[in-house]
Amino acid sequence: MKLTFLIPPVLDGEKPAERTAGCTRVVVAAPNIYELTVVALLEKEGYKDIFYKDFVYNGGTVAEFTEFLREDDSDVYYIWTVNLSINNDLMALELIRKYHPTSFVLFIGPGPTFFVDKCLKSSYEIVVRGEPEMIVCDWTNALRDGKDWESIAGISFLKEGVRVDNVSYPLMRDLDALPFPARHFIKDKVYRNPKLKLTPYTTMVTSRNCPFKCIYCVPSSLTFAREIEYKKEHNKKPFISFRSIENVDAELRELYEQGYKAIGFMDDNFIWTEERTLAFCAAIRKYDFRWGCQARVDAITENIAKALGDSGCRYVDLGVESFDDAILTFIKKGITSEQIDKAIKLLKKYHVPVKLNILIGTSPLETKETLRNTLKKAKALHVDQIMFNIVSPFPGTEFYKMAKENNWIRTGDYIPTDVQRESILNYPHLSSKEMENILFQNNLRYFLSPYFIVSQIKRFSSFKEFLYALKVLKIKLFG
């Protein structure tokens, strides 16, 4: 069988969706290691005719995509679909059906997990709900072996025009059982992370999901798919799955041997215990990577901050959302403004650059005044970077239920939006347009501030690097 993983080109006139975080348009291209792990598992099963076609990376056109489909003869197409890409991917499906009416198309990711009906147009579309690896593997094996794939857990499909939802597939606990992402499929592509300023760059994960109770949060597209499916039956967040230190070390060694210099860890929360974090830092230090991660402020201890600094950590993304303690309590963030200050001081002490993530509108307690105070306090901390986004009422979250019940959603119900620019949220005292304007003004005031410009310029090692950062900033501010 010929199997093809597709990232379709832009067909809907929008900017391409970013498919790993899943809630923004592309600012900086990133490898989708979630999808590449699925690819690797199929390779491990013995499939030889696997292809990976990314039409976004090089700005592929509709004509190029159409020509590819006209000449292609794949038996199965796999598309990792996020909410922001769903309309575009359904347009891709129409083109696929024009040339391949009986090839199977598997939709994977949070988009189809939530919008099941949208993705099922015929008996040849399959929705993979939730965590995808084992479902895709079992379904593909059944198809290859001529067995009954209709009984595979975790899928939805149409049978005689009627939607069938099979039982959920159990989530993985032992992530060591998975192969490393099949990065050889993207070896001709160069990815960059402006926060690390070093290539070759890739991403990794060492765990899945996050146990904390933030009412609005969907940290990544894989987490979103996992949570939507798991919550339907269990009405709570999924358990956390971990990789062992030994397994992570083996992947680090492989990346080192392949010539990678920089790694962004995509874990929803990278820092769990001090013992685990120190062991990871020791492993990373062996290979002299420059790296970064996401963490909670209440996880930063003196020992952890020192280990991060000593092991080449060049950014920690801290999700602080607000500096208003009443808002932090309302959104169940589980932290205080005092803890935010303490974590930043510790990281600065050991020369670990800090990126603050601030989320506008997470609570009806949010006002123009609280937002002004948040910007003022954030700028006064002189961190390395600040990222402003607007909260979205993602389905499956507590905030979504709250927004629906209180009629805060301008469009009546959730529709996919780019949280870096758009809002569908209307509070009685703070409209979506006002939040969009505040977001834009905050970005201008921060990214064009003398402190930010001076502090960043001195970090560039080449003029080419500087020009790339300018390009990223332009996309960030103006699209």
Image (cartoon, helix red, strand yellow):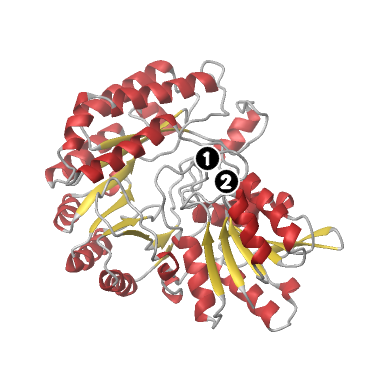
x then y, percent, for residue 25: 49, 41
Residue 50 versus residue 189 in the image, above or below: below
x then y, percent, for residue 167: 69, 65
Say what secondary structure mark 2 lies in.
Answer: loop
Q: Nearer the viewer, residue 412 or 475?
A: 475
The residue located at (44%, 74%) in the rendering is: 179
Q: Nearer the viewer, residue 75 or 265?
A: 75
x then y, percent, for residue 188: 39, 63
Q: Nearer the viewer, residue 464 or 133?
A: 464
The type of residue carrying mark 1 is Lys
The residue located at (17%, 59%) in the rendering is: 311
Which label is found at residue 15? 1
How packed mark 2 is, by other alpha carbons closer than 10 Å (few <14, some 14-19, many 20 or more), is many
Q: Which quarter of the picture shows residue 161?
A: bottom right
Q: Is residue 74 left or right of residue 474?
A: right
The residue located at (47%, 68%) in the rendering is: 37
Residue 229 visible, this angle = yes
Q: Quadrant of the N terminus?
A: bottom right
Residue 154 visible, this angle = no
Q: Quadrant of the C terminus?
A: top left
Q: Is residue 390 left or right of residue 93?
A: left
How packed mark 1 is, by other alpha carbons closer than 10 Å (few <14, some 14-19, many 20 or more), is some
The residue carrying mark 2 is 10
Q: Are marks 2 and 1 in contact (CB under 8 Å)?
A: yes
Which label is found at residue 476? none
Say what secondary structure mark 1 lies in.
Answer: loop
Q: Is residue 317 left or right of residue 52?
A: left
Q: Which quarter of the picture shows residue 66?
A: bottom right
> Which tag, 2 or 1, sits closer to the chain's start?
2
x then y, percent, for residue 317: 31, 45
The residue located at (54%, 83%) in the rendering is: 46
The type of residue carrying mark 2 is Val
